[in-house]
Amino acid sequence: MKTKALYLTVALGMVFGLASCNLDYFPSDELNASVLFADESGAASVIDGCYTMFKEEYDYVDPYASGNTYVRHFFQMAEFPADNTCLSGRTTDNLYEATCYKMTANLKNNSHLWWIGYKIIFTANNVIEGLKEGQSTTADQLIGEAYFLRAMVHFNLVNLFAKPYVLGPDNMGVILRTSTSSENPTRATVGEVYNQVVADLIKAAELMKAPRHQGSPGYATKNAALGLLSRVYLYMGENQKVLDVIAEMGDPITYLDADYPTYFANALDRKETLFASAHTALETRGSGSIGSMYNGDGGGWGEVYASNPLLDLYERYPMDKRLSYIQLQIETDTRLPLCGKAVVSFPIKSDGDEFRSNIFAELKTDGEGKYCEIDGKTYRINEVKVNGMNQPDASGEYTLYFVTYGGEQCAARLYDKYPLCRFNNPNYFVTKFSYQGGDPMLSSPVFLRWAEIVLNRAEANAKLGNAAAALTDVNAIRARAGIPDEGMFETGKMHGYDNALDVVLDERRMELAFEGHRYFDVYRNERDMDRRFPGIHPWEVVPYTADKVQYPIPYVETSVSHIPQNPGY
């Protein structure tokens, strides 16, 4: 029972606004649930403590708390093992192991996420047990928020630490906590966890009728619960239920924010946001923020960039407003021989390296076309025309470039000027987690927004055979991004795609990039992850059936509760 008393002390501490998780501040017998929930303000404080635990920095495993937050670890662990990002070089941060599928059971990021996740669940359970449904709309709202938070954290945990639902609901899931009891922890099945998440979200939507703080998206609402439920059903393959849930929410297209380039810096004030972790100017994390690894401005590390395959998708339509969140840095050091020149880059294989880095050369042109010279040898740059568009004149084609080097055909990229690089990886800074209030390191990370709901509906329709409806939703997202009419899809105008589902998945990739979706989207659709692009990660294709697509259960859990570890660890 020691663990239970420890959890309760943490929850009570959050009520009184402790800045850190001081487990000894309040004796566990000094306050109890009857005192805490004597009125609704106490319950509101406990729920507010849950929201705080998503963003607060805590010491855990080691005494270094900087960057040790739920939001930072979740968005990195859910994004970096996918194919949207390029880690430019080795780092001592555990994000390296996540990026390279070298996770172990004693790493701080997955250990902290597990630990703080169950703290949030425990605290939510205190509210569910401590308040009585039906005593007031305010009480019901608070209980509904508790159900939502419990559902969201369980859902995130089971998707990170277990195999995708589609690979079998009977596979091992995570510990399912639906009460404050800490007795006999066991791993529920994936299906059991999903079923509980569904039940919790349905309950949450039923209860939440009195949004707090003028409906701020920093607090759970009925539509947030329904929006997350649509994602859960999508992951389960319950496509008709996805459509039914979204129908309860109204038309998601009407909630899309017209000013996309400024949306993320102002997410708390925009109608598109369904749920975000609300940060204030006092809660900027500096180099420990999510944005720090993506953006080198304002003291950020700036070591994780947009990947080449993602850039290739965006650049089919150079006017795409989503490119406004990806900023290429240009080299200004005139002492470098390539500074100020047009260049070509492509990844080359190095002896003994499992990853590949770019080689750069001056881009030249003669009567036969484009070429470059490396070590006295001439290499022709081959062009391949692909159906689509990469010019405003709607030519109907876009161009991919290749160089044959070392007996291999290597995908090449052309630059008007030599880019600033880190270990030969061009610095494509990503700013989706930056510039709230003008601070390069501050944002309110978005967990749910209406654009995802549009794409959830599109994917469900594509899988149900409703291709025209799926493409209509895709086109709404593309129109908001500034894609012209020539770039829209119709069942008879597929721009080289074989089917509507492939269109939807690429649109999800572009629209939701860096927001913690791609890792799950690939594997839950039983597709392999192609990571053959430059960066410090292994040059490989990861099968969706591989054991390493799930994170290991933290050693701090298995060593105490003795629940079984995931295969392969």
Image (cartoon, rainbow, N blue to C red):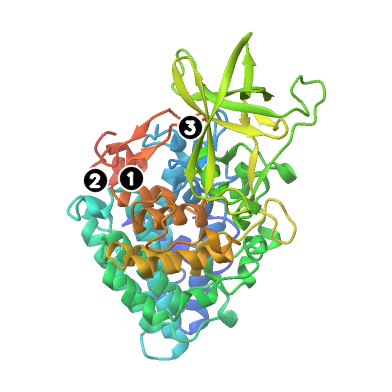
- Residue 2 in percent (x, y) is at 35, 55
- Considering every residue shown, the one lying at the far right of the view is 334
On screen, residue 37 above or below 479: below
Residue 144 in view: yes
Q: Is residue 272 left or right of residue 551?
A: right
Residue closest to the eye, 77 or 114 = 77
Q: Is residue 157 left or right of residue 546?
A: right
Residue 62 in view: no
Q: Secondary structure at mark 1?
A: helix
Tell me the CA gap for discs 3 and 1. 35 Å
Q: Is residue 413 left or right of residue 2?
A: right
Looking at marks 1 and 2 on the same chain, the residue that comes earlier in the sequence is marked by 1
* Residue beneath disc 1: 557
- Density class for disc 2 (Cα within 10 Å; few <14, some 14-19, many ≥20) is some
- Residue 64 in percent (x, y) is at 57, 40
* Residue beneath disc 3: 533
- Residue 548 in percent (x, y) is at 32, 37
Residue at left offset 53%, top offset 81%: 41
Residue at left offset 50%, top offset 24%: 356
**Three-letter amino acid code at disc 1?**
Glu
On screen, residue 473 above or below 385: below
Looking at marks 3 and 1 on the same chain, the residue that comes earlier in the sequence is marked by 3
**Three-letter amino acid code at disc 2?**
Ile
Mark nearer the viewer, 3 or 1: 3
Residue at left offset 46%, top offset 52%: 509
Identify the mark at residue 373; answer none if there is no mark: none
